[in-house]
Structures are given as structure tokens and as C-alpha cells.
Image (cartoon, rainbow, N blue to C red):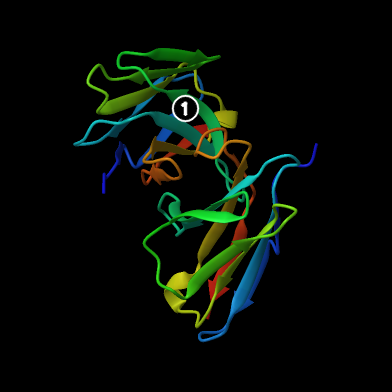
């Protein structure tokens, strides 16, 4: 079973700062999804990346899929308190399930 | 439109008891998946059902079972509860048979004492 490692585990930054979180695996991803989860809620899908080298943008969030499809990153520009949450990467492991990393917990201080 | 609805939102059970968690998918979604999220970790796959058939099962003991009804709602049952079963149980629905386009519910927080 593939293991997804996310780093850092926890990040506390000031509003307006930039940040990058990472998702890595020893094996090749078939495709990768990023989710954000707020306290008391379920994860919300942000993006799906499929092709090596792919870059997708969602407002201030930039998602990158590594050329070898073994890593991915999420970059947030000018973070805001509303970005606070748990960021999870998940691999589409088969025709029916996702394998999640343990997440990066982000706190953006006003 | 209503999202994925899970009930109850919270419950407390004693070790050895049985629990049933319920999930109503988004209207038109035929796929329901269940995940367990222990505090401080990412969700772990338990089951997926599509068109009322089990499509996949995660690495969980036989104490965990599930089913999907003709209206596509689903129940997750856990017997002989252990302290380690304390977690947030998430249901996700999708219009596709695969794990794409998931919409998660807010979960059921189960505490076993």
C-alpha cells in the first residue's frame, strides 16, 4: 500500500505571507487530489491533477504535480485567515478508493 | 441543493456496544463511500458502494459492515465497539463509480468510552 507523506505537519503564519506544503510518495501516483478540511466539517475537494508537470491555479492557490508523478505541492499566495484548515492530499488508489496523507494543519493569524 | 447528510452528528457509546451511522447522498448520486478519520490523521477508506453493490472494502475488521438501500442511502454498522473506534466517520457520495467528484458529509463524531 502506498504511503503519502505530507510536510510540514503544522504551519502557523501571519496573514499576507506565502507558503508551500508538500505531498510525497515513493511510488508513482496515478492521479492526485487536494482537499481542505475545516474543523467539524468533511474534506472539500480543491483540485485533481493527473498529468506529470501539470500546474493548476485556483485563485491564490497553485497546485503542481511533479514531472515523475511522485510528488505534488500546494502554494498559497498572500494567505488569509480563511485559508486556515487541514490540507490533505489523496491518491486515487484504484477504481474505488482514495488513500489520504495525514495532512498539513495550517493556521493563518490575523 | 442538499449536500451529503449524515446522522447523528455526535454520539457516545460504551465499549462492546453496537452503533449504526447513516448517510444520505446528494440526489442523483449512486455511489457512497465511508471513511474513518482518527484525530490527527487523514481519512482511511472503509467501504464503497455503487448501485447497491459493495465495490471495495478497506483493511477493517469484520466488526465493520455496511449496506446501501434502493434510494442509495447507506448505513455503516460497527459491532463490539472498542476505544480505538473513536473517530470521525465520513460519508462521501459521487455520481461516478470511481473516487472522483466526491462530496463529503460533515461526518459523525463517535466517542467510545
The residue to which callout 1 is attached is: A14
Residue B41, given in percent of the width and then of the height, sits at 40, 52
Q: Position of residue A55 (x, y in %)?
A: 39, 13
Tell which residue pokes out farthest to the left in this image: A26
As drawn, the residue found furthest toward the bottom would be B16
In the orientation shown, which residue stands out farthest toward the right?
Answer: B1
Q: Is residue A3 visible?
A: yes
Badge 1 local density, few (<14 within 10 Å), some, or many (20+)?
some
* Lateral position of residue B107 relative to residue A104, left or right: right
Q: Nearer the viewer, residue A61 or A81?
A: A61
Secondary structure under the numbered disc 1 in the rendered image = strand
Choose between B93 and B108: the one closer to the eye: B93
* Quadrant housing residue A73: top left
Q: Chain of mark 1?
A: A
Q: Position of residue B7 (x, y in %)?
A: 71, 61
Using residue A70 as the reference point, say whether residue B15 is left or right of it: right
B48 or A53, nearer to the observer? B48
Q: What residue is at 52 percent from the left and 36 percent from the top?
A: A36
Relative to B18, is B48 above or below?
Answer: above
Specify whether residue A110 is in view: no
Q: Residue at x 46, y 25 (%)?
A: A48
Image quadrant assignment for residue B18: bottom right
Q: Residue at x 49, y 35 (%)?
A: A35
* Residue A29 found in image quarter: top left
Q: Position of residue A17 (x, y in %)?
A: 44, 20
Vertical position of residue B83 compared to residue B87: above or below: below
With B2 as the anchor, is B51 left or right in this view?
A: left
- On screen, residue A75 versus residue A68, left or right, reads right
Q: Residue at x 47, y 27 (%)?
A: A14
Amino acid at each position: 500500500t502506498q504511503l503519502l507523506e505530507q510536510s510540514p505537519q503544522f504551519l502557523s503564519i501571519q496573514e499576507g505571507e506565502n507558503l508551500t506544503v508538500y505531498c510525497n510518495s515513493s511510488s508513482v501516483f496515478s492521479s492526485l487530489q487536494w482537499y481542505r478540511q475545516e474543523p467539524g466539517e468533511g474534506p472539500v475537494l480543491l483540485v485533481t491533477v493527473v498529468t506529470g508537470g501539470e500546474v493548476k491555479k485556483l485563485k491564490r492557490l497553485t497546485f503542481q504535480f511533479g514531472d515523475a508523478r511522485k510528488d505534488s505541492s500546494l502554494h498559497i499566495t498572500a494567505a488569509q485567515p480563511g485559508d486556515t484548515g487541514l490540507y490533505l492530499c489523496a491518491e486515487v488508489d484504484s477504481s474505488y478508493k482514495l488513500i489520504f496523507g495525514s495532512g498539513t494543519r495550517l493556521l493563518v493569524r490575523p | 441543493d442538499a449536500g451529503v447528510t449524515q446522522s447523528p452528528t455526535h454520539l457516545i457509546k460504551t465499549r462492546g456496544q453496537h452503533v449504526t451511522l447513516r448517510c444520505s447522498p446528494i440526489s442523483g448520486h449512486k455511489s457512497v463511500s465511508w471513511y474513518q478519520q482518527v484525530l490527527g490523521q487523514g481519512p482511511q477508506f472503509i467501504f464503497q458502494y455503487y448501485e447497491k453493490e459493495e465495490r471495495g472494502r478497506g483493511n477493517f475488521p469484520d466488526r465493520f459492515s455496511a449496506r446501501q438501500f434502493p434510494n442509495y442511502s447507506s448505513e455503516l454498522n460497527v459491532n463490539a465497539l472498542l476505544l480505538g473506534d473513536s473517530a470521525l466517520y465520513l460519508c462521501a457520495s459521487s455520481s461516478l463509480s470511481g473516487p472522483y467528484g466526491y462530496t463529503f458529509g460533515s461526518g459523525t463524531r463517535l466517542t467510545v468510552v
